[in-house]
Image (tube, coloured by chain):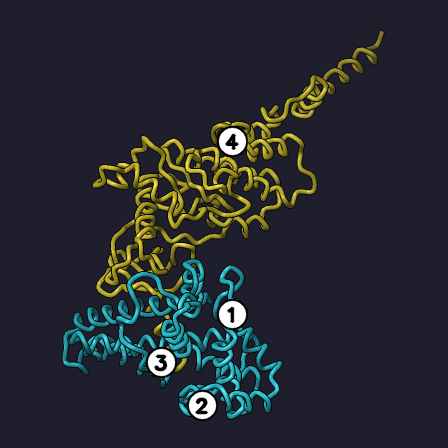
Chain colours: A yellow, B cyan
């Protein structure tokens, strides 16, 4: 048997794992991370002289499902032009035959790490609203993310909130994106189905996956993403010393066991969170008249204080007026 | 049978999934023997080195224990008890070694093996030579050490198979490039220009030949790994563990 010293072993390991970039416009810099589908590498685009991230399938893919999913992901992201979605620059096949795509290299922190630095509840909720905004945009283009977790949200150095890893995204029927994703297939309905049942396994992240998604139901819709958003909201509230009841009610409704009991679309969920931030009543938490009165008082404290000060001053002036 | 670099050709296995686990559980003796042969070829050096380094055994004791281990694998149908849902095959084997070393009464085992079980023809001298060349100290994590040595063994087998396949298809230069660039001169920073000059070929040929050889090497490693795992899930986890470059 050929003897391999440690440097040869490491070189062969890298040769087997790393993308073969010879003959391409890219130069390998280092590895950024590893996912279920493959690896993400930092590479230099030698033509444009800039760093980009290159995603490539990293493990064996005998049935070609991962290759389809990677291409699907690239096409979905390319179609979804939004400030909350990392733009795709290029896609193709490497000399070693593996499909890849390149995207903007984002320097930032994952939300699960970044959240430790965000102490204020309102700041955290504003991040949450940015995530909702992106997901709502995707839904409006008939795309489900299906793997919304804090680890898949990146917060950039200038506060930009980016939704990453669309590898499990699903195209709903009637999507313009789906037509782009599979231009040659006449039976694109089957194409989408293959993605949902890849390897016959449940796709998603435990703890953030909707119950119907965990069960492997084929008919998941945007309410599965709403459940995951509820789980992200729960994560963002974990450190809070006491969670206001209306906010807890919003989170509970988003994570309701039955999809019919949840918010039916993301804008409704986001609107409720925004109402909470504005100090007005939220739909998930019905209030009685006294509670509404006191919340109205709390929301208009400044005006009421001014009014009271005015009335007291007038009373004093009347009382002290020389008779 | 000698268990080193001559474990058959690339057409050993049918194109459908075949694993040593299935083979070892087969009712056919020939199939079981073949499975054990594949297992021994990939694992005997990691087992020997693990016993030498982790258990700090002397050369001869480690040889005896390695022979004992594979004999028990056959006699006691240890692989029948392997549950891929609970552990990787690699981990299971390592735990079996630990149990053997801890529980073996050396004198009785030697007597038993000498009387009833045939020795495997294992080239312990080469393994001992490799140990002296690497000058490794036993790392704290035995699982990592065993995995490292298994990867070394698996990659060594894959390199041998790649050589045979390249020779059979008239692509000796492709293999020689990989051998030079990724094995012999792995610790140095050779440029493709230097390699091209040495072989008297164009730089673009170096790029293409090396890409081919690496692609084939990758395919062979994954095929070999596939035979060493019981399920698709275990295979994927092993591929990621053994091929995935560690993050800094």
**Residue that label 3 marks:** B187
> What kind of element bears circle 2?
helix
First in sequence, mark 1 or 2: give its number: 1
Q: Quadrant of residue B224?
A: bottom left
Task: Please state the chain letter of the residue tagged with numbered disc 1 in the rendered image.
Answer: B
Q: Secondary structure at mark 4?
A: helix
Query: In the picture shown, does residue A259 fall above or below B9?
Result: above
Mark 3 and mark 4: span between their CA atoms? 57 Å
Circle 1 packing at 10 Å, graded few (<14), some (14-19), many (20+), is some
Q: State the separation of the CA atoms marked 4 and 2.
A: 63 Å
Q: Nearer the viewer, residue B144 or B69?
A: B69
Percent position (x, y) of residue A3? 36, 84
A90 sits to left or right of B118 = left
Q: State the image coordinates of residue A202 (x, y, percent, origin top left).
A: 45, 46
Query: Marks 3 and 2: same chain?
Result: yes
Q: Residues within 10 Å of mark 2 (few under 14, many from 20)?
A: some
**Left or right of A211, for residue A297:** right
Can residue A9 be seen in the rendering of this structure? yes
Q: Which residue is mark 4?
A: A259
Marks 3, 4: nearer the viewer: 4
The residue positioned 33% from the left and 40% from the top of the image is: A192
Which disc is residue B91 wearing?
1
Label 1: which secondary element = helix
Q: Residues within 10 Å of mark 4 (few under 14, many from 20)?
A: many
Q: Which residue is mark 2?
A: B128
Query: Residue at the location (21% across, 41% down)?
Result: A184
Residue drawn where x is 58% and y is 31% of the image = A253
Q: Are marks 1 and 2 on the same chain?
A: yes
Whether label 4 touches label 2, CB < 8 Å: no
Where is residue A45 drawn, in percent x and y? 29, 58
């Amino acid at each position: 048997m050929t003897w391999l010293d440690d440097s040869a072993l490491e070189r062969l390991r890298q040769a087997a794992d790393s993308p073969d970039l010879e003959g391409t416009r890219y130069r390998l810099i280092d590895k950024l991370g590893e996912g279920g589908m493959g690896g993400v590498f930092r590479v230099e685009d030698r033509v444009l002289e800039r760093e980009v991230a290159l995603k490539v399938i990293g493990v064996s893919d005998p049935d070609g499902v991962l290759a389809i999913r990677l291409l699907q992901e690239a096409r979905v992201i390319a179609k979804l032009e939004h400030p909350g979605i990392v733009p795709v620059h290029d896609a193709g096949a490497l000399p070693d035959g593996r499909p890849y795509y390149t995207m903007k290299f984002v320097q930032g922190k994952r939300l699960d790490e970044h959240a430790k630095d965000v102490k204020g509840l309102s700041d955290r909720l504003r991040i949450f609203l940015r995530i909702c905004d992106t997901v709502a945009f995707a839904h409006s283009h008939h795309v489900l993310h299906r793997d919304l977790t804090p680890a898949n949200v990146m917060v950039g150095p200038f506060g930009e909130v980016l939704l990453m890893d669309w590898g499990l995204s699903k195209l709903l029927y009637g999507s313009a994106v789906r037509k782009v994703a599979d231009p040659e297939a006449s039976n694109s309905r089957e194409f989408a189905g293959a993605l949902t049942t890849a390897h016959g396994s449940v796709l998603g992240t435990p703890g953030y996956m909707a119950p119907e998604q965990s069960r492997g139901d084929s008919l998941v819709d945007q309410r599965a993403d709403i459940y995951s958003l509820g789980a992200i909201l729960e994560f963002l509230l974990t450190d809070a010393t006491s969670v206001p009841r209306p906010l807890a009610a919003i989170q509970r409704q988003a994570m309701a066991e039955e999809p019919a009991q949840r918010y039916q679309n993301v804008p409704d969920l986001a609107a409720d969170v925004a109402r909470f931030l504005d100090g007005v009543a939220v739909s998930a938490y019905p209030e009685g008249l006294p509670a509404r009165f006191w919340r109205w008082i709390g929301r208009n404290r400044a005006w009421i204080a001014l009014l009271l000060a005015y009335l007291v001053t007038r009373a004093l002036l009347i009382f002290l007026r020389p008779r | 049978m000698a268990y080193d670099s001559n474990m058959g050709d690339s057409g050993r296995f049918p194109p459908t999934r075949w694993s040593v686990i299935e083979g070892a559980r087969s009712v056919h003796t020939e199939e079981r023997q073949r499975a054990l042969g594949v297992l021994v070829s990939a694992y005997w050096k990691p087992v020997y080195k693990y016993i030498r380094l982790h258990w700090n055994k002397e050369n001869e004791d480690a040889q005896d224990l390695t022979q004992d281990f594979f004999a028990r694998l056959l006699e006691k149908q240890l692989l029948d008890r392997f549950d891929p849902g609970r552990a990787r095959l690699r981990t299971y084997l390592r735990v079996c070694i630990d149990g053997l070393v801890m529980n073996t009464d050396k004198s009785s085992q030697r007597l038993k093996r000498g009387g009833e079980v045939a020795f495997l023809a294992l080239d312990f001298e080469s393994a001992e030579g490799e140990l002296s060349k690497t000058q490794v100290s036993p790392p704290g994590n035995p699982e990592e050490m065993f995995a490292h040595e298994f990867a070394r063994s698996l990659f060594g087998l894959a390199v041998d198979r790649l050589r045979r396949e390249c020779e059979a298809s008239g692509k000796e230069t492709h293999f020689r490039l990989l051998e030079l660039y990724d094995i012999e001169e792995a610790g140095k920073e050779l440029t493709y220009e230097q390699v091209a000059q040495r072989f008297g070929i164009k730089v673009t040929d170096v790029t293409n030949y090396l890409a081919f050889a690496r692609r084939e090497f990758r395919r062979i490693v994954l095929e070999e790994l596939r035979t060493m795992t019981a399920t698709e899930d275990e295979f994927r986890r092993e591929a990621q563990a053994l091929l995935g470059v560690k993050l800094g």
